[in-house]
Image: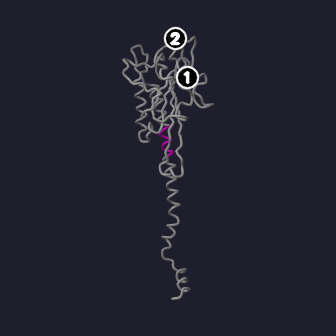
């Protein structure tokens, strides 16, 4: 059989055509499918972080020990409980390994050392191992001892403009306070890490304190609880 006849037969052969088309289209289809999975997973993580921030602010605004005089005291054990609730809620995405959660008590009250009501971040508590730029509070920080006593030395950080991004700050009502939550999380791509770099996700939430809270300090009866201060980086 001549070379020309072989080429002629090969040109007219249609067997294996479907397999050839599949081989050419499979990488495109697979890539589009992986992109869809990645977009869906990223959207799901965004939703989870938003829900965790809101739930944490809600819990922190309610929690405390209510006395017979109807005054609520916030204790270190209480704030530890709500932080652990956030950790458990975010366990599926390794929230405290890949992120940082900050709870701030933004208050607008007159303390014993004030001449008038003053807005300040009285204290902060944190959980999560991530540190450095982008993972600490973007709206003000406090010392680890702030809020642990009713002395002026532990008064916290003044913030006349409130907390939040420019143009979207929140302020505490006069003679009351609010719980402000920040979550910074490093999102690791699920399947497209060869195309998409890890990205930092940032969420905030705040809710006014519900009950008649004692804002003098955050209490720790008998030093029974370990403080989750923001100089610690733990899960």
Magenta stretch secondary structure, dominant: helix
**Towards the viewer: 140 or 72:** 140
- State yes or no: discs 2 and 1 in contact (Cβ < 8 Å): no
Residue occupying the point 43% across, 30% down: 83
Disc 1 on helix, strand or loop?
A: loop
Q: Position of residue 44 (x, y in %)?
A: 48, 44
Q: Which quadrant of the figure contains the C terminus?
A: top left
Residue 54 vs residue 70, the one in the foreground: 54
**187 lies above or below 114:** below
Q: Residues within 10 Å of mark 2 (few under 14, many from 20)?
A: few
Q: Specify the segment rendered in magenta.
A: 42-49
Separation (CA) of disc 2 from disc 1: 18 Å
First reached walking from the N terminus: tag 2 or tag 1 = 2
Kindly identify which numbered label has been placed on residue 219.
none
Where residue 147 appears, x then y in whole percent?
Answer: 48, 19
Q: Residue at x 42, y 24 (%)?
A: 227
Location of residue 182 in the rendering, given as x and y in whole percent from the top left corner: 51, 32
Residue at left offset 57%, top offset 17%:
118
Position of 59 with respect to 163 (left or right) is left
Lateral position of residue 139 relative to residue 75, left or right: right
Residue pointed to by mark 1: 172
- 209 part of magenta stretch: no
Q: Secondary structure at mark 2?
A: loop
The image quadrant of residue 97 is top left
10 Å crowding of disc 1: few (<14), some (14-19), many (20+):
many
Q: Residue at x 52, y 64 (%)?
A: 25
Q: Which residue is mark 2?
A: 112
Instruction: Establish if 190 lies above or below 26.
Output: above
């Amino acid at each position: 059989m001549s070379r020309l006849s072989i080429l002629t037969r090969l040109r007219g052969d249609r067997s294996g055509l479907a397999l050839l088309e599949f081989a050419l289209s499979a990488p495109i289809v697979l890539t589009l499918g992986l992109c869809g999975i990645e977009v869906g997973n990223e959207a799901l993580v965004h939703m989870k972080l938003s829900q965790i921030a809101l739930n944490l602010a809600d819990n922190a605004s309610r929690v405390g020990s209510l006395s017979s005089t109807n005054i609520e005291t916030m204790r270190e054990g209480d704030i530890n409980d709500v932080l652990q609730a956030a950790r458990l809620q975010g366990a599926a995405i390794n929230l405290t390994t890949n992120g940082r959660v900050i709870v701030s008590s933004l208050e607008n009250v007159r303390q014993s050392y004030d001449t008038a009501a003053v807005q300040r971040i009285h204290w902060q508590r944190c959980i999560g191992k991530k540190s450095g730029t982008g993972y600490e509070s973007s709206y003000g920080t406090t010392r680890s001892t702030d809020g642990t006593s009713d002395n002026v030395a532990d008064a916290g950080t003044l913030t006349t403009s409130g907390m939040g991004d420019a143009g979207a700050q929140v302020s505490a009502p006069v003679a009351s306070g609010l719980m402000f939550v920040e979550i910074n999380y490093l999102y690791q791509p699920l399947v497209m890490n060869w195309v998409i770099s890890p990205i930092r996700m940032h969420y905030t939430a705040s809710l006014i304190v519900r009950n008649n809270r004692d804002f003098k300090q955050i209490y720790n009866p008998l030093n029974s609880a370990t403080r989750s201060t923001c100089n610690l980086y733990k899960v």
